[in-house]
Image: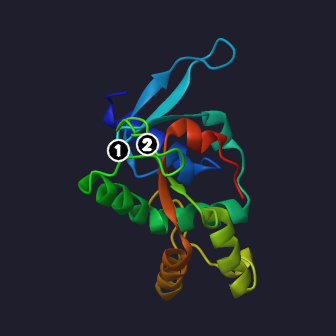
Amino acid sequence: MDDPEHHRLLLDLLDMHPYAEDKIGPGVEAFAIAPPQRGPYSGFQVIRTDGTRIDFSYQDCLKPRTYRQQVLNVMGDEVRQTKSDYFEARRAADTLISDLSGQPLASTDIAVSYFQGPAFNAIAEEFAESLGGWETIELTSSAEQGLGRFVDRDLAERWFIHHQERAVFGLLSQQENRQRPRA
């Protein structure tokens, strides 16, 4: 998918995916048309900035999201750089091995995962509950930049710190990450 307009459209569409955080990973480099996994129709594949690839269904993106899902997407976007920084630090230290199996990882088969600690959704849930629930987190309109933001930037900073204090990242192969139970 070389057309810049199509790229922007797919980015906006991907931001609407209920698992956008997992699909985007450390960032989106490009998109490709993926062979069908089931049935006769092709889908899309995200080519991430770290070289990994993951499929996504545009149909999942078009389902109306709950307010909780919208807040989760914004929360994920607020801390996305921390996952990229973790990956880059591991690459710079030449430690691209699976934290689960101990096996070396190919640069195109790596997932930065919440590892040996709470999952992203559990960290976010704890934060939202500490504020009185999801509805207490006010977001800007997603139309402003394709993805909403916290209206209260001090609250966004509190979320970043909360996440940083609880997130325990690790590297896994894509397959290990898919097979791992989610909390």
Image position of 142 (left or right of 128)? left
Name the side, left or right, on which 107 lies relative to 121.
Answer: left
Q: Nearer the viewer, residue 181 or 151?
A: 181
Snapshot quadrant of residue 109: top left
Q: Residues within 10 Å of mark 1 (few under 14, many from 20)?
A: many
Residue type indicated by callout 2: Ile
Q: Position of residue 64 (x, y in %)?
A: 72, 50
Q: Find residue 38 and report its horizontal and vertical position in percent.
A: 68, 18
Q: Residue at (48%, 57%) from the top-left corner? A: 170
Report the mark closest to the observer, 1 or 2.
2
CB-based contact (under 8 Å), mark 1 and mark 2: yes
Q: Where does the image place residue 65, in percent across and percent down from the top left?
A: 70, 54
Q: Going from the N terminus, do you reach mark 1 or mark 2 first?
A: 1
**Residue at 70% over, 86% down:** 130
Q: Which residue is mark 2?
A: 110
Residue labelled with disc 1:
50
Front residue (pair 60, 55): 55
| Secondary structure under the numbered disc 2 in the rendered image | loop
- Disc sitting over residue 97 in the figure: none
Q: Secondary structure at mark 1?
A: loop
- Structural crowding at the residue carrying mark 2, measured as other residues with C-alpha within 10 Å and reported as few (<14), some (14–19) or many (≥20): many
* Residue lying at the far top of the rendered structure: 40
To which quarter of the image does residue 74 belong? bottom right
Q: Residue 161: percent from the left, percent from the top?
A: 49, 82
Q: Is residue 51 visible?
A: yes
Q: Label 1, label 2: how many angstroms apart (C-alpha)? A: 8 Å
> What's the residue type where badge 1 is placed?
Asp
Work out whether residue 144 can be spotted.
no
Q: How many dots with numbers?
A: 2
Between 126 and 116, the residue placed more toward the observer is 116
Work out which quarter of the rendered image holds the C terminus and state it. bottom right
Where 121 falls versus 43 (above or below)? below
